[in-house]
Image: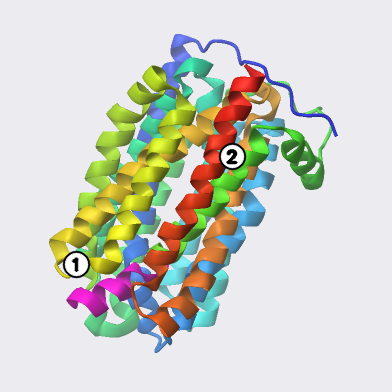
């Protein structure tokens, strides 16, 4: 099957650029709601009396929904427009938070998380919007700004979640942060409705493409299939660590929701600075592929440190190093993919990349569960560090492919 053509999108207008910053504010509000929930999930699951392996199922359920939804929403946004897809997904996500607050048992909660994963599978749509309104040479920086908005949301959300949650009250104690997250998602949906304009017009009659057809095109492209593998490998290790972090911190330092919220706050400050100021600067100076490889090396160092820490400040340093590495790696991957596809395929190919990340978020927690139980709390960190090595090798292959196609 023929490779995806490499073309550029037209330069954005000044109005489009203003709309982009409105969208960044909406992203911040929505992700703050998402961030309220993530550090609390292990404790939420435990409130139902769940064993450790069911905690991982709760994490994985969300990623299963994401995996199937991202290419669907991305492809649909190429076809009918970004704005209606964003409205459907964000308002739907608000509803899942409300349902989660009143879930009667863990298995119903898992089904709700599955639906939430489907309805938050809009990252590729947001990235497609960014590509629509940004010249190719500035996309790494703009995608970094989007990452900074995400990080600000995660910086705000976990702190609020830690303050609102009352784990001593059982499941009822998690209703306030969940309902707060629903309110933030609702506010984000209203922001999309009122302030974000459409960037895709006149494509509703374009021929429909199957998921496998788009995947075949991606796998035939010398740059894209390698970037998808970088995302899959590196994110699998991170997702396994993320799913076990709360339990690891509890085992190591007797941390609860408030301490974990503080740790996420420090991590998010680092990621906000890096993605807002550093990623675009480095991408313009040394290129997206080199920036990606530096980021992967930092992720490796941060993960490799964690099994050996015996004091909580060192654990925070390790996580900050990982956050810095991610801040350089993933916006660069998005920019590389965006440069490699036509304007009509941005959402579809971004969706495949995000689906690779979602697949990693399924594999990672399911891999981490037996590692955590059988080899100790630090085992997922060690495996995550090991996975960075093949990811680095594949990133080097991406660099070579980009140079050949230039």
Q: Which residue is pictured at 18% across the width and 75% down the height?
A: 253
Dominant secondary-structure state across the stretch colored magenta: helix
The residue beneath circle 1 is: 258
Q: Quadrant of residue 363?
A: bottom right
Taking the spot 47% from the left edge, 32% from the top edge, the residue there is 332
Say if the magenta span includes residue 246.
Answer: yes
Q: Is residue 115 left or right of residue 138?
A: right
Quadrant of residue 375 within the rendered picture: bottom left
Name which residue lies at 49% across and 30% down.
Answer: 289
Query: Disc 1 vs disc 2: Cβ atoms closer than 8 Å?
Result: no
Please determine whether, in this image, residue 9 is positioned above or below residue 154. above
Q: Is residue 348 above or below residue 169?
A: above
**Numbered range of the magenta stretch:** 243-255
Q: Which mark is residue 227?
A: 2
Residue 122 makes an appearance in the image: no
Q: From the image, which quarter does the N terminus lie in?
A: top right
């Amino acid at each position: 099957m023929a490779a995806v053509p490499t073309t550029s999108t037209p330069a954005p207008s000044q109005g489009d650029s203003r709309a982009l910053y409105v969208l960044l504010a909406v992203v911040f509000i929505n992700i703050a709601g998402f961030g309220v929930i993530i550090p609390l999930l292990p404790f939420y699951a435990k409130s139902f009396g769940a064993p450790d392996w069911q905690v991982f199922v709760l994490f994985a359920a969300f990623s299963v929904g994401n995996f199937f939804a991202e290419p669907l929403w991305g492809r649909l946004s190429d076809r009918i427009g970004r704005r209606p897809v964003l409205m459907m997904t964000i308002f739907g996500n608000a509803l899942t938070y409300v349902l989660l607050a009143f879930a009667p048992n863990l298995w119903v909660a898992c089904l709700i998380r599955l639906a939430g994963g489907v309805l938050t599978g809009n990252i590729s749509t947001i990235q497609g919007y960014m590509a629509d309104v940004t010249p190719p040479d500035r996309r790494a920086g703009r995608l970094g700004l989007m990452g900074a908005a995400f990080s600000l949301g995660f910086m705000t959300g976990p702190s609020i979640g830690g303050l609102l949650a009352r784990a001593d009250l059982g499941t009822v104690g998690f209703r306030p942060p969940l309902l707060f997250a629903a309110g933030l998602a609702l506010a984000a949906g209203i922001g999309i409705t009122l302030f974000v304009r459409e960037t895709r017009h006149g494509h509703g009659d374009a021929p429909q493409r199957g998921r496998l057809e788009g995947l075949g095109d991606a796998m035939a492209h010398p740059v894209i299939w390698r970037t998808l593998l970088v995302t899959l490998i590196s994110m699998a290790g991170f997702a396994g660590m993320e799913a076990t972090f709360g339990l690891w911190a509890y085992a190591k330092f007797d941390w609860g929701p408030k301490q974990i919220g503080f740790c996420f706050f420090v991590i998010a400050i680092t990621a906000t600075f890096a993605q807002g100021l550093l990623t675009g600067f480095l991408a313009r100076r040394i290129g997206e592929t080199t920036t990606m490889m530096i980021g992967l090396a930092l992720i490796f160092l941060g993960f490799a440190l964690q099994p050996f820490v015996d004091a909580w400040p060192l654990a925070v340093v390790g996580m900050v190093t990982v956050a810095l590495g991610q801040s350089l790696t993933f916006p660069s991957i998005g920019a590389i993919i965006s440069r490699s596809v036509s304007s009509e395929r941005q959402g579809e190919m971004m969706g495949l990349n995000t689906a690779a990340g979602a697949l990693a978020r399924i594999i990672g927690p399911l891999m981490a569960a037996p590692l955590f139980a059988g080899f100790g709390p630090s085992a997922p960190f060690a495996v995550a560090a090991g996975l960075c090595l093949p990811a680095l090798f594949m990133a080097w292959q991406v660099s070579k492919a980009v140079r050949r196609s230039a």
